[in-house]
Image (tube, grey):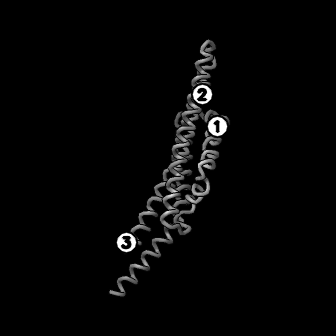
Amino acid sequence: MVWWRQDKFHRDIGKEAVMKKNIRLVLLGELLLFVAIFLFNILLGSWGFSAILWFLDLPSLLLILLILIPGLIIMGEWKDFLKAFSVGIKEYRLLELKNIIGAVSAAQKLTVFAALFAIITSGVLILGRLDDLSVLGPSLAVCFLSGFYAVILEFFLMPLRLNAERRMNEEMDLEDE
């Protein structure tokens, strides 16, 4: 019976070593996947690489980030949010993991609210200038980019939350043993 526990202990340590690299590799893998699919979509549409510039709108991105980051700081969640990037690499207690999950959840909600704020603001500005139809297309494109940026941010926030939840469940299992 003792040899089985030692073997299980060594398997768990090996599993822990894999988890230490997991979240950063997942985020890097998601970034590469996102860029590859994005470029494939651009090239498939035969618009060429100049179409990439259509997806860049610094004011929309800044508006989302200016709501997300100060919002996390004001709520006191910024430090816990940053810890989410090292879950599985550093050891955290259950309460810390719960706080990290809460911080990532707050970041997800703030991202959605920031995007909605930007979309509604852009929509009101578009409706205010309907007399000039030549600006309708570019203005609608900018309006949609806020939602696009929110989807990209959520694409990276979801694995952070899932990783922290998985780690918290593992910690709870260890306490039960």
**Which residue is situated farthest in the front direction here?**
75
Q: CA distance from mark 1 to mark 2?
A: 11 Å
* Residue nearest the observer in this picture, 55 or 140: 140
Instruction: Residue 119 in the image: state x and y as whole percent.
Output: 56, 30
What amino acid does circle 2 point to? Answer: Thr
Report the residue at 49% width, 50% height from top. 158
Tag 1 and tag 2, C-beta contact below 8 Å: yes
Is residue 3 visible from the viewing direction of this image?
yes
Question: Which picture quadrant has residue 143?
Answer: top right
Crowdedness near tag 2: few (<14), some (14–19) or many (≥20) residues, C-alpha within 10 Å: few
Q: Give, as a three-letter code, the residue at label 1.
A: Leu
Quarter placement of the N terminus: bottom left
The circle on residue 4 is none
Which residue lies under the disc numbered 3? 176
Q: Earlier in the sequence, mark 3 or mark 2?
A: 2
- First along the sequence among labels 1 and 3: 1
According to the image, label 2 marks what residue? 121
Could you say which disc has been placed on residue 63 in the image?
1
